[in-house]
């Protein structure tokens, strides 16, 4: 049996959910196809960052700031609690060298309109008393926030359904036929769906879906691991990140004083208090295909890094660890774009920024499809920047 | 039949009623119920409540108990402190 839809969204993670929601709001009869359950991949194995402070000043930070600004309205709009909180964030400097580079980062962000404020050693400890005494300062960013990524994804899908969208869970896309001028037939292991518009929001599986229409999309899985603490007192009241996490972007000579494992697995402090009074502690980065098993050496390195910044963590329990694979794009920018194939769109490659950029991405794709005025210039996100990578497309 | 007001997941304080509501909204596995209600996400990681949640899912959907897959387990098997996790550097 062939069904029809105005648009088919492939992927039930936060990006697909957001696209579905904004399409439904624009009265597009959209259908989401997800091979597992909603938020069962990357969006269920991440943290709830909505941050402009860790982005590169410029287009990156403009998009991140805009992305963050859309959350309060969305949280009010949905019937489902996404646990949005806007407590800001603090990026801490481990030594004077980091502080020097950090001040430059803060100045450039401020120029782009990101509301940042620098703290000296005394101020940073007044702000977060449990920080290790030798931390020399920090940068506060007021517009940053956090939420529960699983609730966000489920909330967007439920909101879209209420507006008339269709959701097919446990439905695997097996092929995409190009159907002359009419568009596509999306083949699945259940029904086939005829549609003029397909949006590839398959996250770490984006390249597989791209292959079905002859597009070579440079996105692959990159694993990150997180520790979950027990419910306890507030170690810190808001998002804390070490500036060393960003140093590589700004200085090729900068070296952190870290263990070989921390170096090897890219381990850096990312602390996130949750709405249920526990906290998540990351982070790591490694390319291991689709492997989402926990690695003991990484767990240990994350714990060590946590205690380095917050010695008080020493006696708090870890109750779980998890790993997720993030859609890593070869040039670190997501792809939010139309393609050489009319009607075929890509929204993927956000790596660690997918939660924060979910709403701006969903809005952009919906506006592109409906021919509306765009919320931000999408040129830097265009798939056409990889023009030399296109294989066997028959236009 | 478990009464609606029974606290099924004591760690995260989730009642049978909240679990039944999640099932009505489409949660069809222990993992999906966990994602919507947090049942099984707390200190005991579902060791206490998982079977009760599975019973409710079975009653509400008609699935047999042996068709309901257990939720994923992850290290550490028992809670350990961040300090214990660090151990000695064996590099």
Image (cartoon, coloured by chain):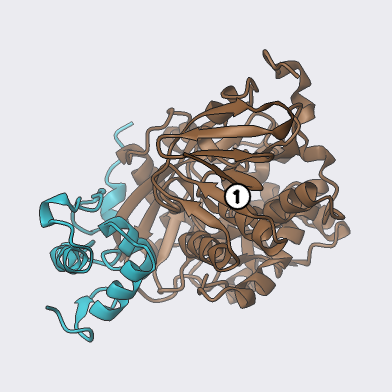
Residue B56 appearing in the image: yes
The residue sitting at 66% across, 65% down in the picture is A144
The residue sitting at 67% across, 13% down in the picture is A392
- Against A292, residue B40 (above or below) is below
Q: Nearer the viewer, residue A76 or A102?
A: A76
Q: Nearer the viewer, residue B54 or A386?
A: B54
- Against A32, residue A135 (above or below) is below
Q: Position of residue A45 (x, y in %)?
A: 43, 50
In the rendered structure, the answer to whether residue A132 lies left or right of residue A76 reads left
Q: Position of residue A370 (x, y in %)?
A: 79, 52
Q: Position of residue A214 (x, y in %)?
A: 63, 20
Q: How many marks?
A: 1
Q: Nearer the viewer, residue B81 or B37?
A: B37
Q: Residue furthest top?
A: A392
Chain of the residue under the numbered disc 1 shown in the image: A
- Provide the residue designation for mark 1: A354
In the rendered structure, the answer to whether residue B50 lies left or right of residue A113 reads left
Q: Quadrant of residue B11?
A: bottom left
Q: Position of residue A82 (x, y in %)?
A: 52, 70
Q: Nearer the viewer, residue A182 or A239?
A: A182
The colour one sees for chain B in the rendered image is cyan
């Amino acid at each position: 049996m062939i069904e029809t839809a105005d648009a088919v969204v492939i992927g039930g993670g936060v990006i697909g959910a957001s696209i579905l929601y904004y399409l439904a709001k624009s009265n597009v009869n959209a259908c989401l196809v997800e091979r597992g359950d909603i938020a069962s991949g990357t969006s269920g194995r991440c943290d709830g960052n909505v941050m402009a402070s860790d982005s590169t000043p410029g287009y990156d930070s403009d998009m991140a700031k805009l992305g963050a600004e859309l959350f309060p309205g969305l949280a009010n709009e949905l019937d489902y609690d996404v646990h949005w909180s806007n407590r800001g964030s603090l990026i801490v400097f481990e030594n004077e060298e980091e502080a020097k580079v950090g001040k430059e980062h803060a100045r450039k962000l401020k120029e782009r309109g990101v509301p940042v404020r620098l703290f000296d050693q005394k101020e940073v400890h007044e702000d977060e008393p449990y920080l290790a005494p030798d931390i020399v300062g920090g940068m506060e960013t007021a517009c940053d926030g956090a939420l529960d990524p699983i609730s966000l994804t489920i909330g967007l899908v439920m909101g879209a359904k209420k507006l008339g969208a269709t959701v097919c869970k446990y439905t695997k896309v097996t092929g995409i036929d190009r159907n002359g001028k009419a568009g596509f037939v999306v083949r699945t292991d259940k029904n086939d769906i005829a549609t003029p518009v397909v949006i590839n929001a398959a996250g770490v599986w984006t390249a597989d879906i791209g292959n079905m229409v002859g597009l070579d999309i440079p996105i692959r899985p990159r694993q990150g691991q997180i520790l979950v603490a027990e419910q306890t007192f507030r170690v810190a009241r808001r998002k804390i990140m070490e500036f060393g996490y960003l140093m590589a972007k700004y200085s090729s000579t900068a070296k952190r004083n870290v263990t070989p494992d921390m170096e090897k697995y890219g381990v850096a402090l990312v602390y996130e208090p949750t709405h249920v009074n526990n906290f998540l502690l990351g982070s790591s980065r490694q390319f291991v295909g689709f492997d989402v098993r926990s690695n003991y050496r990484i767990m240990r390195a994350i714990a060590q890094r946590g205690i380095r910044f917050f010695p008080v963590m020493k006696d708090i329990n870890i109750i779980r660890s998890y790993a997720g694979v993030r859609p890593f794009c070869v040039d670190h920018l997501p792809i939010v774009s139309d393609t050489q194939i009319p009607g075929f769109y890509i929204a993927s490659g956000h790596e660690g920024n997918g939660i924060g950029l979910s709403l701006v991405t969903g809005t952009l794709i919906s506006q592109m499809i409906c021919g509306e005025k765009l919320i931000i210039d999408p040129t830097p996100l265009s798939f056409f920047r990889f023009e030399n990578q296109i294989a066997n497309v028959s236009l | 039949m478990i009464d609606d007001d029974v606290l099924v997941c004591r760690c995260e304080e989730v009642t049978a009623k909240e679990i039944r509501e999640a099932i009505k909204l489409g949660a069809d596995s222990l993992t999906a119920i966990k994602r919507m209600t947090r049942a099984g996400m707390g200190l005991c990681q579902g060791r206490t409540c998982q079977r009760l949640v599975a019973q409710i899912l079975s009653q509400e959907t008609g699935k047999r108990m042996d068709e309901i897959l257990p939720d994923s387990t992850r290290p550490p098997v028992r809670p350990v402190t961040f300090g214990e996790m660090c151990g000695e550097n064996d590099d």
